[in-house]
Image (cartoon, rainbow, N blue to C red):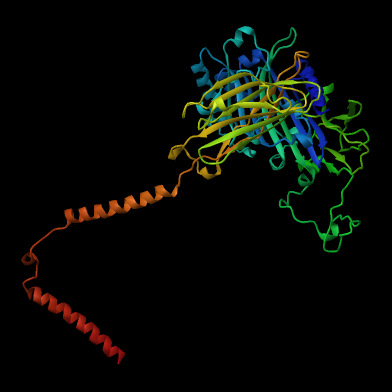
Amino acid sequence: MLSSLIFLLSLIFVTCTQADSDYHERLLLRPLPQSALLASFNFRSNESSASFEHRNFRYFPRSLGQTLQHAHTKELHLRFSLGRWDAESWGARPWDGTREGGTGVELWAWVDASSDEEAFARWLTLTNALSGLFCASLNFIDSTKTIRPVISFRPEGHHTNSSLLNLHLLHGTLPHEVVCTENLTPFLKLLPCKGKAGISSLLDGHKLFDASWQTMSIDVRPVCGDGSECVLEMEQTVDMVLDIERSKRPRDNPIPRPVPTEELSCDTSKPYNSEDSCYPLDKDAEPSWSLAEVFGRPLKGACPLTDASGYESETVCINVPTEREVQVNTSGTYAEERHEDGLLRCYKLPTGVDFDLILPEQVPTANLALEEPPLYAARSINGHGQERGSVQAVITNPSTTSAIQFVYLESLPWFMKPYLHTLRASISTSPSSNPIEETYYRPAVDRHRGTHLELLLSIPPASTITLTYDFEKAILRYTEYPPDANRGFDVAPAVIRLLPSNSSPNTKNVYLRTTSLLLPLPTPDFSMPYNVIILTSTVMALGFGHIFNLLVRRFVGVDEVENWNTGGLKGMLKSRIERLRARFLGKGKKDE
């Protein structure tokens, strides 16, 4: 249901984009089980190819456009992600996973170049420019974090056959990158209304990065209609899953505090209920919420740059059962239209005034059916010790009727060296069969490139594939360890792409990503260099002081000392003895 609704909205987007509107935005809200809310923000803008080549930017951001021109990038896909999508509780991923990235930062692009060396040089230019544009560490995507996928990704835009010959696909990840408000602010500056109006006015860093799962994506691709001029389309997407009760917490109370005893809802029917204990009372009603409560602010009206007619005027859509009450709070004029048998309600936003949706507490008679994901995937590191380990990926096909063919992509760091001869894949329903149809393997080179592994597999209905392989851990140099070396090293998530079946070759792409891994490496005792430095410095100081003393000190005879003849050595000793005697005698008189 969720994917079909988003697919319907995407069709409306494409129709609007190829028609009159140069900029369009839409927000889809969908309540999820366990008091969760999925909010999908989508922004689309396009620029004609002629205007882009002549650097006549209107809705397309000039900063990003000039970067793509300088790096000769024909198609770009950038992802900022945090958290884990709970497929068992939330169902299928929004946008079928095409707008989702792995934990941290993920980037892939098609670069126009005549050779691999030139393509990589332009790739470095692109990553360095995007690093400054989005305040991220994309400049750390070097050759050790870059791969060239073969069958995992396909261009989303329209490219001619002649241009495809010179396009090079490069892919890089930064799983350790921390996504924060510094990345959201440049993201909003790329929008025409820049978060001041429209649905982008709801994007607040305090709410976005407090979500259970969130991803920000930027996609730039050429789009050509039937007989119309080609345009360069830019799509920005923000997807987040918010905890309604947690998000409703006021800004002045950032630390959750216990509810007072008199406000607790206890189940008094339990036999062990007493005055000093409380058993939680299960609520059948859907919690009440509003845009102002969940996002901390109401929606600041429609962006005036969007077209005010047609489907594109329906900026905010909410997916709830037909009997669910939805109230609108605004001083302006709005319009409501229902799609999908009343399950999808879309609202035309007024301009210049606040707009708020309110859902009061209500007991539903029927819940929305969650769409089951096509695959379930989980990956983990097994084994113990500091030298070797193994990786296990478990992929399950929940369908009982259709088999699925998919591509499994691994991008491993160079210090994690897998043994390809230990690669095993077994099917739960048929242990003797081998589901691996094709294998692409590019081994790692120390400090030059990582491991690139792509597998083409086929999983039968109602089956589970267990994929395992062993690897060896390398020992890094002292300067290659980060400050938090004992924490471990992040390994990028695996990318799974579902291939269309022979019966429906025009099926849209579906992507899944596993969670990232934390790899512990052999870590030296970093206190030993300190001890060596201290010991070496002490020895050098003693040796230098002794030699310096011998070189600088002047040795003279006794008779060469001035005033030495007046009394000589005996006179000097006698005078010192007299001083000591006078000192002790004086102290004794004071005591008396």
Left or right, 67 with reference to 354: left
Viewer-proximal residue, 305 or 3?
A: 3
Query: Where is the N terminus found, in terms of image quarters?
Result: top right
Quadrant hosting residue 19:
top right
Counting every numbered tag in the picture gives: 0
Q: In the image, residue 488 lies at what x, y percent?
A: 55, 41
Q: Which residue, as the protein is rendered here, is positioned at the far bottom? A: 592
Viewer-proximal residue, 253 or 121?
A: 121
Q: In the image, residue 55 lies at what x, y percent?
A: 61, 18
Query: Where is the C terminus found, in terms of image quarters?
Result: bottom left
Residue 438 visible from this viewpoint = yes
Left or right, 531 with reference to 73: left
Quadrant hosting residue 418:
top right
Residue 235 vs 380, above or below: the answer is above
Residue 166 vs 542, above or below: the answer is above
Residue 192 visible from this viewpoint = no
Q: In the image, residue 408 lies at what x, y percent?
A: 65, 24
Q: Which residue, as the protein is rendered here, is positioned at the far front? A: 432
> Which residue does the image show at 22% across and 55% down from the upper left?
546
Left or right, 128 with reference to 591: right
> Which residue does the image show at 84% across and 21% down from the upper left?
310
Q: In the image, residue 491 lies at what x, y percent?
A: 58, 34
